[in-house]
Image (spheres, grey):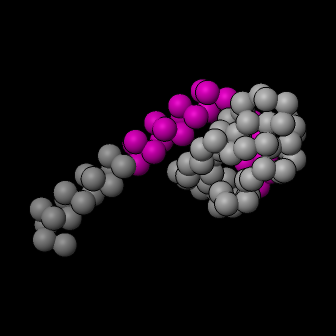
Amino acid sequence: MHPGEMKAGVRTPFGVVAEVLSTSPVMFAGWELDYAAWLVRLEDGAVRLLTTNHGGICGMPADELAERIRETEDCASQLRALQARAAELGA
């Protein structure tokens, strides 16, 4: 699901989205379809963190969110090291 496709009225396994409170890209190595997360308020008032799994909407537990953050920070660190090495070698 494209990040812009999550909006009020979307049916999820947890209920119907009443409002999208926040959207974030998810840096997930190896997956083409699972690259967004949303914080939504459902019509029943519940607030849920959602993502996708193989393109289908699912919940995102806090530990999974923490893992995605660690992966993103690790990737950024490796990219900075690559950038520094390339500059050092004049690439």
Q: Residue at x 83, y 51 (%)?
A: 10
- Is 60 included in the stretch rendered in magenta? yes
Quadrant placement of the C terminus: bottom left
For the residue pair 3 and 91, the one nearer the viewer reads as 3
Q: Please tell me whether residue 83 is drawn above or below residue 17 in the rendered image.
A: below
Is residue 17 depicted above or below 67 in this figure?
below
Query: Does the magenta-highlighted stretch encompass residue 35?
Result: no
Q: Nearer the viewer, residue 67 or 82?
A: 67
Q: Tell me the quarter of the picture where residue 22 sits.
A: top right
| On screen, residue 30 above or below 45 | below
- As displayed, is residue 7 above or below residue 59? below
- Residue 28 in view here: no
Q: Which residue lies most toward the bottom here?
A: 91
Q: Nearer the viewer, residue 6 or 34?
A: 6
Viewer-closest of 80 and 1: 1
Q: Residue at x 79, y 36 (%)?
A: 42
Residue 41 point in image, percent of width and height: 73, 36
The residue stretch that appears in magenta: 52-75
Left or right? Give the position of 16 relative to 77.
Answer: right
Q: Residue at x 55, y 52 (%)?
A: 25
Question: Residue 27 in the image: x percent, y percent?
Answer: 53, 51
Q: How many marks?
A: 0
Q: Quadrant of the N terminus?
A: bottom right
Asked if one can make out residue 58 in the rendered structure from this viewpoint, the answer is: yes
- The residue at the point 67 percent across, 29 percent down is 61
Q: Position of residue 66 (x, y in %)?
A: 53, 31
With 21 as the anchor, is 68 left or right in this view?
Answer: left
